[in-house]
Image: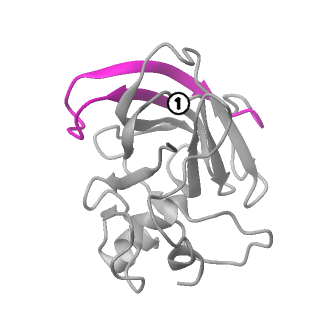
Amino acid sequence: MAIHIKSVRIREGSSDEVCWPRDQQVWELDFPIANTARIGVGYLVEPERFVWSQMPYTLHDHKYSAQNAPDTNRAWVIYEFTAATSVKDVIVIQHANGVVEIDGALGDTPDPNGQWRSLGVAQSRLVGSATGDRIFPEFARDQFVFPTVGANTGRFLKLVMKKTSLKDGWAMYRAYPRNSDGDAFTPASANIVALTSA
């Protein structure tokens, strides 16, 4: 049986500029979608479009603990799967000022401060850990491969944005975790049109 994404959540108030969660006040979303008018953070796993148009980001923040280092108390995403699984990598649709390092971990609880089994820190395949203003092409499709692929499993995946290209701000359009075969996990839904037609 295929494993799907059951929910996705970020810390409430963790985006301080224009983006779907802040604008719609939806910081956590369960699938299937109950209200297609308020998807918020659920857009993080919206199916990828062939032609991108300008639209709000899904994650967008400017709170930092150091230069190029977002505040990790707020720069995280937690995915819940329908069953325990392994995660190979994450495909990120980048903003021009995006993320260059992501720390991944699997666990058995959605508590961001709970016990997590590390997948290691993955770097951008496009730019490595390079920094600078607008180093990504807008909507660039980037891959972050975790060093310990297949070593751990869990029902929850936590991604922490560890390093960004710009010293004091970052944004992201989409982030698709993929299984050990390289297939993206899709939202648990009988009809994915709910995401694409909103």
Q: Position of residue 40 (x, y in %)?
A: 40, 71
Q: Report the residue marked by disc 1.
A: 87
The answer to if 122 sits in the magenta stretch is yes
Q: Position of residue 122 (x, y in %)?
A: 59, 26
Q: Against 59, is 112 above or below?
A: above
Q: Against 17, is 177 above or below?
A: above
Depth order, front residue of 59/46: 46
Seen as rendered, the residue at the extreme front is 1
Q: Residue at x 61, y 49 (%)?
A: 98
Q: Residue at x 67, y 31 (%)?
A: 181
Q: Position of residue 83 (x, y in %)?
A: 37, 38
Q: Residue at x 32, y 62 (%)?
A: 30
Q: Against 58, is 118 above or below?
A: above
Which image quadrant is residue 32 in?
A: bottom left
Which image quadrant is residue 82 in?
A: top left
Q: Is residue 90 visible?
A: yes
The answer to if 49 sits in the magenta stretch is no
Magenta stretch?
103-127
Q: Position of residue 127 (x, y in %)?
A: 76, 35
Depth order, front residue of 11/166: 11
Depth order, front residue of 15/194: 194
